[in-house]
Image (spheres, grey):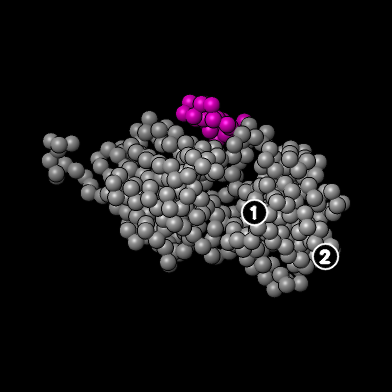
Amino acid sequence: FGLTPAWAQKTAYPGVTDNEIRIGNTAPYSGPGSAYSTIAKVEAAYFRMVNDNGGVNGRKINFISYDDALSPPKTVEQTRKLVESDEVLAMFNTIGTAANLAAQKYLNAKQVPQLLVGGGATHLVDAKKYPWTLGWQPTYYSEAVIYAKHILANHPNARIAVISQNDDFGKDYLGGLKDGLGDKAKSMIVSEATYEPSDPTVDSQVLKLKASGADVLVNITTPKFASQVIKKVAEIGWKPTHFLINISVSVGAVMKPAGIENSQGILSTAYLMESTDARWKDHPDMKAWSAFMDKYLPGANKADSMNVYGYVTAQALVQILKQCGDDLSRANVMKQAASLNKVAFKLMLPGIFANTTAADLYPIQQLQMMRLKGEQWELFGPIISSGAGQ
């Protein structure tokens, strides 16, 4: 580069040269959240594949990912390093709601795109307050709106009991459920219970909810407690229609410990294909993903749904960069991020699209209901939009 005359450079954008685009990321490669690091590993592998095929508009993606151990102060420290030392064009899919919130003010003040954030809390994304932050997955709020719509359509006289975690995560879901039920929330929700993440069990909460006479249970819990709820509901012979949030639908981590027989008929939602679902085995997109995993990430666990999530999220970044053409200014990156028009990425469920506008920076607001049958989740019904207009 030393001999290249200045006028030969096409651009003078941060993180961009004639032949590379630097993208920053933090992920928990160590610490209690290290299971999530597979997401960043899949993304890195995806960008290697893109680079092997010529890159994006002739430029290779240089993906620089640092360990933040899921510790917000560490996220801020690593993000500053990526922006100020590595001079990345944008941050991409930092994992964790708290991590993204910690870095958000800094990135927005610096006008550095915070793209496709890896967290579902609604307050992470606010186009007016944080115009440089782009969401990704359906929010906790919009998922709960969809449960409310399903209940109104299929159980109009439901007596609803809700258990939720006593923090922003639980309140986000609860807010979506109540807003989705609208005027009927007060009469339909007959009992509410909360728990602390440090509680040893939630048995007493389940007993309280059953005593209310509820016939629908909305279970807003993380995997450990989800398993406890399912087990206790079965033990006391309660048979409500049971809705479980989609972060806790792992058959291996939740249903099997609770007893597969106790988990039958539980309802949840999905927006991505499940790699373990036999129905997608011969789908061309699943075959392509499987071949990609074998070549670029051999030895990774193909049954881990996070490896599907990372693959789809990486596609979304590539789409945004492609739309930028040669204008890789940070402002144009955000403009293109806010101009996703019904894009169907590979391994998203058929009929689900990513859509954004400058006023609505939540790309995915659709989900499909699913029900546990045997050890498989079975999709049913139409694609439902939260229509939350958040």
Going by the numbered disc 1, the residue's amino acid type is: Ser
Name the image quarter holding the C terminus. bottom right
Q: CA distance from mark 1 to mark 2?
A: 25 Å
Q: Secondary structure at mark 1?
A: loop
Could you say which quadrant of the image residue 213 lies in?
Answer: bottom right
Percent across and percent down for residue 198 are: 64, 54
- Residue sitting at 23 percent across and 47 percent down? 11
Please state the extent of the stretch shown in magenta in the rendering. Answer: 282-302
47 versus 210 height, above or below: above
List the single residue furthest toward the right.
237
- The reply, left or right, for residue 204 in relation to residue 61 is right
- The reply, left or right, for residue 207 in relation to residue 23 is right
Of discs 1 and 2, which sits in the foreground?
1
Q: Secondary structure at mark 2?
A: loop
Percent across and percent down for residue 51 are: 37, 33
Q: Is 97 within the magenta?
A: no
Percent across and percent down for residue 4 are: 14, 38
User: Can residue 105 be seen by looking at this rendering?
Assistant: yes
Going by the numbered disc 2, the residue's amino acid type is: Ser
- The reply, left or right, for residue 157 in relation to residue 120 is right
294 versus 20 height, above or below: above
Percent across and percent down for residue 275 are: 61, 36
* Mark 1 or mark 2, earlier in chain: 1
214 versus 337 height, above or below: below
Q: Which residue is mark 1?
A: 198
Q: Main secondary structure of the magenta part?
A: helix
User: Can residue 134 be seen by looking at this rendering?
Assistant: no
Q: Which mark is residue 212?
A: 2
Mark 1 burial class by Cα count in 10 Å: few <14, some 14-19, many 20+ = few
Could you say which quadrant of the image residue 216 lies in?
Answer: bottom right
